[in-house]
Image: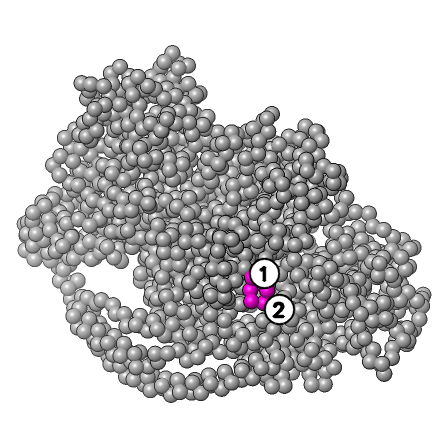
Amino acid sequence: MSLAQPSGAFDTITPSRPIRDGETIISPGGTFELGFFSPGDPSKQYVGIWFKRVTILSVAWVANRLTPVTDGKGVLRVTEQGKLILENGTGDVIWSSSSLAARYNPVAQLLDSGNLVVRNGIGGDVLWQSFDYPTDTALAGMKIGINRTSGFNRHLTSWRSFDDPSPGNFTYGIDINGFPQMMLRQGSDIKHRSGPWNGVRWSGSTTLGLNKYYTFELVFTDEEAYYHYQLRNTSFITRLCISSTGNLQRFTWIDDSRRWQLYLNVPVDICDTYGLCGPHSICTIMESPVCACLKGFIPKVPHEWNATDWSQGCIRRTALGCGTDIFIKYEEVKLPNTHYSWFNRTMNLKDCHDSCKKNCSCMAYSNIDIRDGGSGCLQWHGNLVDIRNIPKKGQELYVRMSAAESGLLASSHKKRTLAIELMTGLAAIVLGICMFLYFPKKMIGKRTGRTAATAQRFRLEQSTDGEEDLELPLFDTSRVSAATGNFSLENKLGEGGFGPVYKGVLNDGQEVAVKKLSSSSKQGLDELKNEVIYIAKLQHRNLVKLLGCCIQEDYLLIYEFMPNGSLDSLLFDPTRRNLLQWKKRFDIITGIARGLTYLHHDSRLRIIHRDLKASNILLDKDMNPKISDFGLARSFMGNETAANTNRVVGTYGYMSPEYTIDGAFSIKSDVFSYGVLVLEIVSGQRNRGFFHPDHQHNLIGHAWKLFAQDRNPLELLDPSIKETYDAQEGIRCIHVGLLCVQQCPEDRPSMSKVVTMLESEMQLPSPKEPGFFNERKPENSLKETQRIFLMASTNLFFFSLFCALSVALSATDTIQEDVSIRDGETIVSSQGKFEVGFFAPANSNRRYVGIWYKNISNGTVVWIANRDVPLNDTSGVLQIDGQGKLSLFSREGQNQTLWTSNSSITAASLVVAQILDSGNLVLRPKDNTDPGSYLWQSFDYPGDTFLPGMKYGINLVTGLNRPLTSWRTPDDPSLGHYKNELDPNGVPQFFLTKDSVIQFRSGPWNGLRFSGMPNLKPNPIYTFQFVFSNEEVYYTYNLTDSSVPTRMVLNTNGILQRFTWIEHTEGWNLYLTAQMDNCDRYALCGPHGSCDINNSPACGCLKGFEPKYPQYWQMSDWSDGCVRKRPLTCQEGEGFLKYFGMKLPDTRQSWYNKTMNLEECHRVCLKNCNCTAFANLDISGEGSGCIHWFGDLIDLRDYTENGQDIYVRLAAAELDALSSSRGRKKARTIIITVVTTTFLLGAIMLILKNRRKRIAGEQITTRTWRQEQIRAEENDNKDLELPLFDFTTITTATENFSLENKLGQGGFGPVYKGTLKDGQVIAVKRLSKSSRQGLDEFKNEVLCMSKLQHRNLVKLMGCCIQEEERMLIYEYMPNKSLDSLIFDPTRKLILDWPRRAHIINGIARGLLYLHQDSRLRIIHRDLKASNILLDKEMNPKISDFGMARSFGGEESEGNTNRVVGTYGYMSPEYAISGLFSVKSDVFSYGVLVLEIVSGKRNRKFSHPDHKLNLLGHAWRLLKDNKSDELIEASVRDSFNIPEVLRSIHVALLCVQQSPDDRPNMANVVLMLSSEIPLPLPKEPGFFSGRDLSDMELSSMKLDTSAGNAITVTLIEGR
């Protein structure tokens, strides 16, 4: 890096004293410096802050991350208004701060904290500070968190690379959803989660703890939530930063050695990978495999779990029973993800337990704060994700389990003394007996609070682990079997990835389609559940309707029957495609677009389909398209629209480039698939397998060529529709299709924009080059796509996309002396497992001879011949030369030999080279296959990969050593910086080095594993052994199950990793890493120091030792280690102190004997004054063998399990002191245990007595409750399909309907705010006895709302029908109704123009859904400002469907004798004649828009110059070209004038007198979201100059005696 020179002792920048490139300012104490620097490219300069006293340039903050100064003439100045601006040489501002306006003398000052502040003069108010805008580094005193009032978020963002400070892919910040926790993300994908704050540390932190260097805390108030740290000693220099590779690291500066010391690193190990083991599982780093189900849970997909794919997690072994459930205590764990948790800071643990037990959706609970015995309550609702074991620092978690799992409560823990074991055992036995007596053998009833109609849906919820309330009817297997003729072949409609699909006819004559999960399908219960969850909650006329499911003997999904089958069955059939003439195809294109728009934008959950294709588009009897198959779909909350996955699923030909290659999916992935689909519909040809005689492009490429070459796009049209097509529509569809398939996701339009483009004549932008625009051979397209897919799945670089590796030499596995292989040819092992040939790594043109997997990953390279001498062209030839060696030469280089096998053995006969199914390439005599006859083998010369059967070690006779060596970079296989090899000196052990400097040591083999690799354990994937003889020393492993391949790789970053192959995801899964955490860094704590990852700091001295240099140790420089407190004198009385669970020290200077026992080992060591420690050589069985150490003990660490015992020599005086201390501690432990056990027994008996009484009471309550539910069910609510709440629950939630909780009053009755026991806030609408609305309106609202789902419609959560009570329970809207804001002189200021425009558009989208896109066409009939509710983000929600009417099919109007609605919003034809239609709602919407724009009510609007209402006034202003006079004064500072005027214009079109003149809501949405020309509006309805108090009523000619009454609702919000 280059940087500027100091310009003086200034610490400030003033308007008159800027700094230029080459000048700096320095903080008063000389701690930090600010100036210009260049991290890599000298032509790019950045303004940054760096540590002044640190000799290595260490930048802590960067101003202009995105826009470097490129002319070397940068100037940083403070303006008179108090803004910091950075200008280049031409005076252009390339960066500026967002300071508040200064009042006087603004200055920018660099503080000793590293904070750059802009003040009103020296010492004045802070207007702006760099600490509010951190980059990749958190300094002491900086807040990392969120201001909960303003929403201002401070988080760390990595550099893009080590020499590019622009924002990278990784962020670290706080997540305040649920209980706060820190998230490390890669893009939007969570990489690591800290766990919630527990009062002491983050629950998931294994390294964060009290230390002598800095303090830390989480501040969590109503105003803000942030994490920060403070230095105990300001001379101590430390920084917390996020690296460009996504690691959160704390460094401390070691001044003596002038280097940064890594203090801690996150993620610590593989168990810190977010959600590694899936839901309801736990990760234990010392186990192999690391993932296991929680007690009482079993793998969700056993065959995937056994293949080490744990992503689907675990499900309950026994379904919950709610009231009878128990809680199992887990200790020393990281608490699960709290994103969907509830908390209360004042509860104690018992109250927390009781609250959780009463709430059937509460899955677990824990204390919030673990200090002082624990306090607060944290509860989880839903899956428990990302749990890991953390010895010593973990927390207690209580997990809900069925009473049938009560046996789990009787677990016990081992203790170190016999007395403690006996006491604990007794307590466990008594506890087990009590639990057996206490819990009844049958669960007490079904889940309360639900009717019998809901019980079936609940059983489905339980069978799928309670994750979602599916609310879907269950079909009986026999019923479905009878409907499908026992799944006869005659009724089979087709086959998909899920399994076969059958046609069926139910007893009532309804035709259905039944999807049956095949036993051979790669999809399973998870995909079934996924589909059920999404389709059951989605309601749109262009989505397939799910009628129910069956989960008995078989997994079945029952859908509405689609008589025209799937789109592909017509589109690609030469005969049936004639049924799809242009009009039908265009309707299908727009219908799919509307369905996707709903999924992406309008449903409450944003849904990404991930498998959109022609076969997943079904066609009903009218050829209306229905999107189907949601088994692979993913959902997002809020404004999320993207994620990342390690499991790429979908269909070749439809997947987007970024999803195929990187696993990154978003709504733009679906847009790409839609674009492919549009081109297929227009052309009648598949994208995959498309062939054209003039080129080798796919369909996308062909369409792009037509467009790019200005040829007629209609050449793409299917010939069968050329007589019926509309040229303009056809060209527009092709154009839109090409916009959707552009390479870059950001260039693709959203689906709402696509709908606008298709339905308007707006000008379209020119598309850029599409994804996958490349020439390829059609027969190889599958293989090429698979290679791209595998690059994403494994992050290994296999082959160039364009390699022709598929041409094999007649499937031979050998190279004969008279046969060579050339570039483009390969040989394949006999069973097709491995292949040998030429390849080029990704992003490289260099050619290599290599071995790769053939039949699984189809490209993972495991060995390379010519690593350092690549070919630059395709002239390579591999053959057996005249000396019987395997040689590689180039035909273009005068037959220059580039590589040869270095066999020293000469064959007496002909030789062949053969690739074996082990991946070993061998050179052997042609007539001898015995391994002992091999002349040479690739297994003796490994690259970066260690395969099963390979000997990884050294031949002591020949001296042949077989190390692993990393690639130099991911796309350069030449020898890299890292090597892992066996060192035979002393007791053999492996060393991993970087350029000959030791980075990691395995420790010696101890009969079970390497001493420094506690996670190496017997497992179901592979067996392993260490051979240690006089001839050779090596480590090897073999597969237990050949169907689960595994390999070990030394990657380019020096990490030794084991991967296993996951068949169903077709990708490599990381199984374990040799280096687990920071303590695995070689000799981190120096001689006689021991590293414990659970401590902070991690390094400590062995007992009897102290830091060699305390002053360095205090500054976290542990490299010099520790020295003895009392020196050894080899006098009588010296002995050995036993250390438990250790990694044995470096054994290069050790001595060993394989036959001694431990006692003999001890005696020999004691007699030798130079022997400093001893241990068993082999710990298997009872232990055997002996190791002695001489000199310093280096590279020790503590393990919580799987460590080894070592005996360290200490002076006599030191042993005496330690022995006395241990005796006192042991006595104290026994006394405490006896007292505690006695208390426990007494408490158990007391609890048993009280709980028996409680059970009796609960049984009575349960019987009473069921009787109430039966009465409710009999009261004609069987069609409501909605959860029922009991009256007591609602009464408690609303505090007995207190006036303090009353939100307002409507025509239905009063509305109350309530809080359920789980903390969820609700709004309760209670039918008033005096209300003119009754049960019909109540039921109408329930029927409508339960069948609608849209983000702009209020969510109905349930209802209560009990005796005379009728209540509706909604989600609570904290901002209440729209009228409470826009008509309030003070609160209207909250609604600036962007928010009002957002509300206008949201209401329009909600109405469009009601009128056109929901399965039933709904006319609201009472749209008004008080029926528009606003959530916390000001999103509008249409509410109050008590007056709504629904229509089927294409109906859209009706007539009534009972006119209902609100004055000022009703249309003329409805108010006067009782005629209502979708155009009635359009009229109301127009009124609403004018009210939103003007801030005035239509009714009672007055103007001094006329007697017109608001509509008439707006129309007159439009005619006079003065529409801007209508705009609310409070929004004039924020409005976009063209946007406001368009809104007014659209509103006036909506309120025209004649319904036929008004646009439908589809056109309204189009008008608002585009710039299409608008027609002039005609005279609005009720355009008259009159006194509003009388004229409105008289004009309606009401005759109440005839029953034609108007129902008027008060305009009050809830």
Identified at 36% across, 44% down, the residue is 1061
Identified at 72% across, 85% down, the residue is 1330
- For marks 1 and 2, give the CA distance: 24 Å
Q: Is residue 729 magenta?
A: no
Residue placed farthest to the top in the image? 894
Identified at 36% across, 61% down, the residue is 298
Residue range corresponding to the magenta coloring: 505-509
Q: Quadrant of residue 1611?
A: bottom right
Asked whether the beta carbons under mark 1 and mark 2 sit within 8 Å of each other, the answer is no
Q: Main secondary structure of the magenta part?
A: loop
Q: How is the image coloured?
A: one colour
Question: Residue 212: where, in percent of width, then height?
Answer: 36, 58
Q: Which residue is mark 1?
A: 511
Which of the pair 26/36 is nearer the observer? 36
Relative to 324, is 583 above or below? Answer: above
Residue type at the position of mark 2:
Ser
Camera sees residue 1385: no
Question: Residue 583: where, in percent of width, then height?
Answer: 72, 46
Classify mark 2: residues with Cα within 10 Å, few (<14), some (14-19) or many (20+). Answer: some
Res. 1346 mark = 2
Relative to 658, is 1234 above or below? Answer: below
Camera sees residue 934: yes
